[in-house]
Image (tube, rainbow, N blue to C red):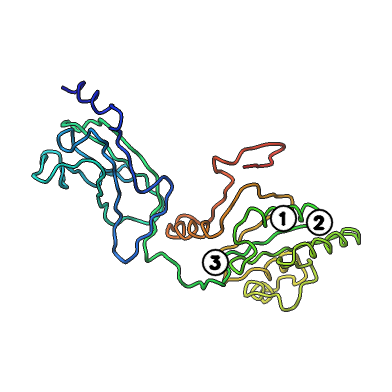
Amino acid sequence: MLLPLLWSLRAPGSALNIVSPREAETLRTRGEGEGVSVRIDLGADVRVPEHGVLALYVDDARVLLACPDRVKSASECPTPGAALSGEISLGLGNMQPGEHALTVELLDASLAPLMLAQRVFTFLPASDEDDSLPEDAPAFNMIVFSKDRACQLDQLLSSMRTHIRNVLTPFVRLQVLYHHSTSKFADGYKAVVKLHPGVRFHQQGNLSSNVTSSYYSAFAAAGGPRDSFKADYLRLLDDSIPYTLHFMDDMLMTDTWDVREQLLTHRVLSSRPEVTTTSPRPHLCVSICNRGVTRR
């Protein structure tokens, strides 16, 4: 009996498919206590429980069985409800914020898998939405460090303007802390300043007295050297901006990057206390080229 059943389920149009959530999609709930629901396409030739039992797993933990109603064990199948077929919707209930792996299986009577579909998605409940930032408030403080490399700095800033969406808006504070050792290098930085009017430039050791922060005040109060690189850096920090990113002048942006999408990612990660910092360097899309330089 099993071989003919498997043959029929492999026919065209019978593939089990997860319609929603899409791969790598972020699901947001609209209200407190609202659970997550998924949409599944059983395929044209599949009916539950006629062809088996439907099982849903989140992060390898089984969250429900359906045949066609929700049950706790396969011994309760089949249930008297109308058979499940075509595209159906099933609720997963409440879950923890973060990234989750969803697996949908069609099981036979012995709970052996006949068909399988998998999807990775991120869940963000309404309570984790950060509405404290108005539209014109910075969410990212981007600080670039540069010394005697005005040409490289110009290339980095130009690539950021090209590839980072929202980078020259009030949503982002883009700053450069630079230093030059000769007058020729100084002339180069003067030219870069004119080319990038939307960027805040700060010369190391010559910052305006208006540029300060609570981090710098605490550092100075503890006896830290006020004329040091560390002091200048601390003056650029702002505890009212949730996230700070650092760049070196020999870096380049080569692909589109949306800071609003990244903000959503950081908000999801902030719900996990074991995560203290993130880096794109271990990502699979980053490869190694000449002498340890990374590229996407």
In the displayed structure image, the side of residue 130 where residue 292 appears, left or right = right
Q: Nearer the viewer, residue 128 or 40?
A: 40
Q: Farthest bottom residue?
A: 210
For marks 3 and 2, give the one nearer the viewer. 2
The answer to whether residue 221 is above or below residue 205 is below
User: Rounded to the nearest whole Å, what is the CA distance between mark 1 and mark 2?
Assistant: 12 Å
**Residue 22 at what x, y percent from top left?**
39, 47
Is label 3 in contact with label 2 (beta carbons under 8 Å)?
no
In the displayed structure image, the side of residue 257 where residue 39 appears, left or right = left
In the displayed structure image, the side of residue 33 where residue 202 appears, left or right = right
Residue that carries the numbered disc 3 in the rendered image: 242
Mark 3 or mark 1, which has the lower sequence index? 1
Q: Nearer the viewer, residue 231 or 43?
A: 43
Mark 3, other Cα within 10 Å: few <14 / some 14–19 / many ≥20: some
Residue that carries the numbered disc 2 in the rendered image: 150
Residue that carries the numbered disc 1 in the rendered image: 158
Which residue is depicted at the point 59% across and 64% down? Answer: 140
Is label 1 in contact with label 2 (beta carbons under 8 Å)?
no
For marks 1 and 2, give the one nearer the viewer. 1
Mark 1 or mark 2, which has the lower sequence index? 2
User: Rounded to the nearest whole Å, what is the CA distance between mark 3 and mark 1?
Assistant: 25 Å
Mark 3 or mark 2, which has the lower sequence index? 2
In the displayed structure image, the side of residue 276 where residue 163 appears, left or right = right
Local secondary structure at mark 3? loop
For marks 3 and 1, give the one nearer the viewer. 1
**Residue 289 at what x, y percent from top left?**
68, 36
Amino acid carrying mark 1 in the image:
Ser
Amino acid carrying mark 2 in the image:
Ala
The answer to whether residue 201 is above or below residue 107 is below
Dividing the image into 4 quarters, which one contains the C terminus?
top right
Which residue is depicted at the point 53% across and 56% down? Answer: 262
